[in-house]
Amino acid sequence: MTYTKDSLKIVFFGTPDFAVESLDRLVKGGYNIVGVVTMPDKPAGRGHKMFQSPVKEYAVEHGLKLLQPVSLKAPEFVDELKSLNADLQIVIAFRMMPEVVWSMPPLGTFNLHASLLPKYRGAAPINWAVMNGDKETGVTTFFLKHEIDTGDIIQQERIEIGDTDNVGVVHDKLMMLGAGMVVETVDAIIAGTVKPIPQDELLNKDEEPTPAPKIFKETCEIDFGRSAQDVYNHIRGLSPYPAAWTAIKDSNGVDYALKIYETELPDSRIIGKPGTAVATKDKLSFACSDGSIEVKSLQLAGKKRMTTAEFLRGFKLGE
């Protein structure tokens, strides 16, 4: 069967802003989006106001058919999805999908993943690429199969990671790059020119795929026993979200959780036990295994984000 942009029926699965850019390109490009699937609304914040995903907000604004299943295996959802008669499904920053869903359309289901697969399979590929000090990353489209992020690759594109880029900067670069590649992938599927490559063929002999597991609070804690460069990368790989943190003691001996968003590597070296904090009038530094890092912006628990100078005007560092 031959397809055109108008005749190819697409169901789009996604949740955060990262997915919205791709959906927007498809809608504005005139592709036939017959349904959008996103997470159910959930209470968020102190007032427990119902949070709607960015993908839902976009779908409602553009009059797209919206599905918000609690369970992707629920018979009523599966039946409704079947009734849309999609030829192709696209998944971006969504949850694990059961086979009954991803195997449904005749042309399959493809995913946009924010790494150069098979590197960084998992939930947090952008964070880990920056945290590990990688010099490049990219985006991949691939067809879904049983094991997560293991399907055959359709397309890949690379970008450089700048030495000072944080995860927010890289996220936005990949969001834009990925949106263009989603459209290119759909066009290639319509044209019948796709030649998927098994991920194993991209691995060197004895090389293993790199995991990118979910980030937890303990992942974010800063280990000052590492090199200053490693600590610097760890912090920018978690900035602005969820943010790296450490404990800091005030002059009364009280410990506080301190989120650190931005640092730099100073020319001068602090010789001291790793983790030792040293403050001057407007500078705060922490000793690492081979030098130090200087903190530029931070946030004390319960306070807003601020510059180091602002922080030190109201906080007296303990001995």
Image (spheres, rainbow, N blue to C red):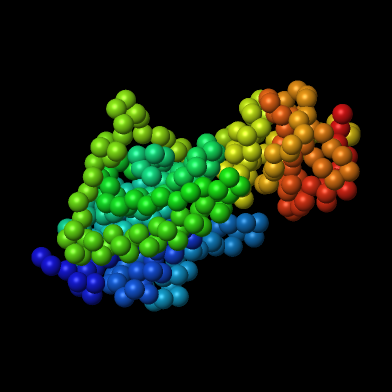
Across and down, in percent, residue 78 comes to 26, 57
Across and down, in percent, residue 175 comes to 46, 58
| Any part of residue 219 in sight | yes
Quarter of the image for residue 92 reads bottom left
Q: Residue at x 64, y 60 (%)?
A: 47
- Pick the front one: 232 or 152: 232
Quarter of the image for residue 120 reads top left
Question: Is 133 rendered above or below residue 75?
Answer: above
Across and down, in percent, residue 24 comes to 41, 69
Q: Residue at x 23, y 61 (%)?
A: 188
Q: Is residue 115 left or right of residue 280?
A: left
- Quadrant in which the C terminus appears: top right
Q: Residue at x 62, y 56 (%)?
A: 45
Q: From this viewpoint, which residue is outermost toward the left?
A: 1
Q: Residue at x 77, y 51 (%)?
A: 307
Question: Is 171 rendered above or below residue 287?
Answer: below
Q: From this viewpoint, which residue is outermost toward the top?
A: 273
- Pick the front one: 249 or 267: 267
Q: Is residue 256 left or right of residue 4?
A: right
Count the marks.
Answer: 0
Quarter of the image for residue 56 reads bottom left
Across and down, in percent, residue 224 comes to 68, 29
| Any part of residue 83 in sight | no
Question: Is 77 rendered above or below residue 156?
Answer: below
Q: Is residue 170 left or right of residue 90?
A: right
